[in-house]
Amino acid sequence: MDKPLKLYFIPYLAAGHMIPLCDIAALFASRGHFVTIITTPLNAKILPKYNNFNVHTFQFPSQEVGLPEGVENLSAVTDLDGAYKIYQAMALLREHIENFVEQHPPDCIVADFLLPWVDELANKLSIPRLAFNGFSLFTICAMESLRSHPLPEDASGPFVIPNFPQDIVINSTPPAESKTFMDPLFTIALKSNGFIINSFVEFDGEEYVKYYEKTIGHKAWHLGPASLVRETIQEKAERGEKSTLSVQKFVDWLNKKRDNSVIYISFGTMCHFPDKQLFEIASAIEASGYDFIWVVPEKKGKENESEDDKEKWLPKGFEERDNGMIVKGWSPQMVILGHPAVGAFLTHCGWNSTVEAVSAGVPMITWPVLGDQFYNEKLITQVRGIGVEVGVDEWVVTSFRGMKQLVGRDCIEKAIRRLMDGGDEAIQIRERSQKLAKITKHVVQEGGSSYENLTVLINELKQLRDCKVLN
Ligand code: UDP
């Protein structure tokens, strides 16, 4: 092999951004390139243990921003003030990171689009920069369509994505604040040498790749599902936070269940539901009668709750019924989704969760909350037909600001039954999910679309490096 590339990856300080970007970093490293992840000490700890890249850390400025020791990312804070402090900390780290990169310049920087200043840094060093935001290309296209064809200012409720390859109706209009926040980030990301997408062309669809390249005039590199770089149960389990219960406990419990009989319920790392909402979810699970694994990070550290407190979010006797596992913290999601007993995933449609469900062939019950999730829902249900909707239409600005509407137990139970009770629709959804999962196995192997995209990207980056040397 000719001279390997030297790449720096700068993830944002949030589990849902770090995990996939580090998996993508591992893909580059698996081809023999020198990869360094730049982060802070505690975030370095949640990176997968088995890795083939270097990690360079900068002390997190806890005191300067007023966060307690031990809180270094968005997933560890529980309110808007905490989230703001993480943003502030990242801004304070900028100078340190810039100095390091300038003193030891790489051949390319791959950075989260929430760090727009990397654009200036890459220009200064005349090196290519790739942007990452953890969205699907379908979602990026939808957001760009709305930027160039804005909805009327007083628009509310469902809307059709303007000037789009397909007629897609989104359940709810994005809040104005999301647009104000995202638009400038997209403007800068589009100046990069391309977006890295943690998905595969067959899932987003060729039509969206063409649409993006022709209409937006920017390059998108589908390199995923990056999580497939983690092959063994151990590798899959040791990704992200430490699991609240041992991985073996989950596997042993699931081993006793029939194929496709368990519902896995998780809303990712950033959703914080009020007790009343948790009660509705619990009531729906109970009414459905299905076995379940339910991840409730809101209850982390509350193992010894009083009966009175417990009854605020769990119907009486819920835990005694013994047909499920409640996880108050972190679950080994990839291991759970990969078990044949899991028959459905009630999800907030976070992009990582979506791609992980697709890779495992698990159909989804969709309940988007914010951001890209409302678009992802449509790719899952309307475009690919691998899930059913709960029917949520409240789009919140941040998951810390309480939701106004309660999603009732009846519509949750109805969506669960649509998938789990069998019937023609459910059979077809399951078949499509399994077909797509088969494709994922192929795309990351030699000859597969994502594998070959990575080869082309690496060659382009080498050319850019070698031209620079000649100049
Ligand atoms: N995750 C996990 N266990 C948990 C919660 C989350 O392994 O208990 C992982 C999940 O597999 C995914 C990521 O954390 O890789 C969450 O990313 P996603 O985009 O789905 O949601 P976000 O947290 O960013 O909203």
Image: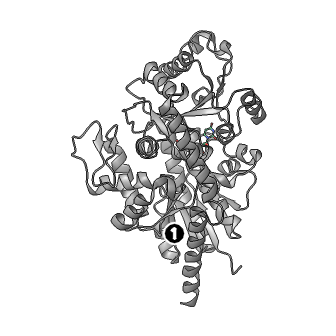
Residue 338 appears left or right of 371: right
The reply to whether residue 45 is in sight is: yes
Which of the two residues, 190 or 446, is positioned nearer the viewer here?
446
- Residue at 49% across, 75% down: 124
Residue 139 location, x and y as percent?
Answer: 42, 51
Amino acid residing under circle 1: Arg
The reply to whether residue 102 is in sight is: no
Residue 373, located in which quarter of the rendered image? top left
Under circle 1, the secondary element is strand
Residue topped by disc 1? 129
Residue 120 location, x and y as percent?
Answer: 46, 69
> Disc 1, ligand 1: is the CB inside 8 Å?
no
Residue 48 sits above or below residue 10 on the image: above
Residue 67, located in which quarter of the rendered image? top right
Which of the two residues, 394 or 211, is positioned nearer the viewer here?
211
- Residue at 74% across, 48% down: 235
Residue 347 sits above or below residue 355 on the image: above
